[in-house]
Image (tube, grey):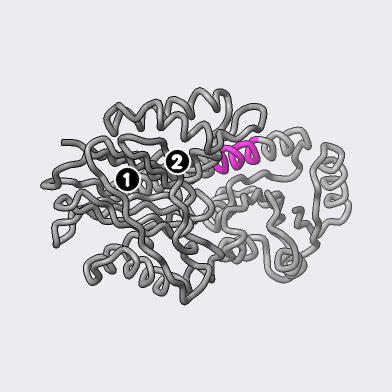
Amino acid sequence: MVVEDDSSLRDWISFELSYDGYRVSEAADGDSALAFMDAAPAPDLILLDVQLPGMNGFQLCEHIQKLPQMAAVPVIFLTARASLDDKLNGFAVGAVDYLTKPFKMVELKARIQALLRAKERQRLIGRQEEHARREKEMAEAARIQRALMSCSTEGVAGIDLFAHCNPARIVGGDLYDIYVRHDGRLSVAEADVSGKGMAAAMVTSEVRTVLREAGRMLASPAAIVSLANARLYEDLSHVDKLVTLFVGFYAQETRTFLYVNAGHSVGIYRPAEGVPCILEATGMPLGVFEDANFEERVVRMGCGDLLVICSDGYPEATNAEGELLGYERLLDAIDHASSQSAAGIVAALNQLIAEFTTGCEQTDDQTIIVIKGKE
């Protein structure tokens, strides 16, 4: 922007700078300049005369520095006032350069280019710092989310258990939570929030909190899931999210696993002397209906019996041809790996996913819990 009361000089500067590709705005006095700044986006640089009608250039520059949208805009004084005091006054009110008249246009252009390059470098540094700050925040969020995925089976006999979560982004919408209840049963929960990334991750923390709270008060998976749905329904509706949930209790005295499958895509049971089968849903995902019923089912967890709970990131893993892994391949892989430990089965399934999706970006969170009965 050029603020100059001499119309011939103003026109010359505007012509030369426009010819070089700059978009130039003009004002003949301070009031006109301020009116333009109020109505238009902030300019990248201001060329400012000192001797202007009304407020002088020093007063205008000082006023500009107080405007939040203008505080970072560099000002070059173009003036015939060449005394040291005038130059000091110019820098004191916020100018970054001071060029006396008469001046050579080539020098003015060089100073403009230097200032704009410096300004762009500052913008780049600012963007890099902002990116680094965001990366640090995301890494901290991922660390907290991993810490919230508890897997403790201390004191529980008769099973081998392993859990793993591989989010599609730094943070994800899947979670698992495994701990020993006050009544001695092992509580196992896996949830999958619709979507992924930070938005889904924020919901998972609320889901875990509600499940833990319900687990302290209630003694059955169905009651816990019902209460969780009632507590979460309004929040889920407001953010247009659903949560599939698999919650169960393992009782070592009876070697049984009592569970609720609230729309969770993959629950697979393989008896020691049998073939893998998909455990059908026993209720709707959380967030569909405010009042929902959830039925309980039970499977035996004797020696060699196998339960695999995983999010839809497994069957819906996609290869380079756009083909889904699907349930048939997943069932076959579980059957072939069933003689291995729980950790070995997880490793085998993850290897299957990696080989099937070679060269493809992971598009969904992948979370898995494997429970295998043992002596």
- In the image, which disc is placed on residue 366? 2
Kind of residue sitting beneath label 2 = Gln
Instruction: Check disc 2 and report its element: helix, strand or loop.
Output: strand
* Lower position in the chain sequence, tag 2 or tag 1: 1
Q: Is residue 133 visible?
A: no
State left or right for residue 34 relative to residue 283: right
Q: For the point 27% across and 38% down, which residue is it?
A: 372
Q: Residues within 10 Å of mark 1 (few under 14, many from 20)?
A: some
Q: Secondary structure at mark 1?
A: helix
The residue located at (26%, 56%) in the rendering is 249
Q: Nearer the viewer, mark 2 or mark 1?
A: 2
Asked whether the residues under the numbered discs 2 and 1 touch, taking CB atoms below 8 Å apart as contact, a structural biologist would say no
Q: Residue at x 33, y 39 (%)?
A: 271
Q: Residue at x 53, y 35 (%)?
A: 328
Q: Which one is nearer the viewer's eye here, 3 or 216?
A: 216
Q: Which residue is mark 1?
A: 146
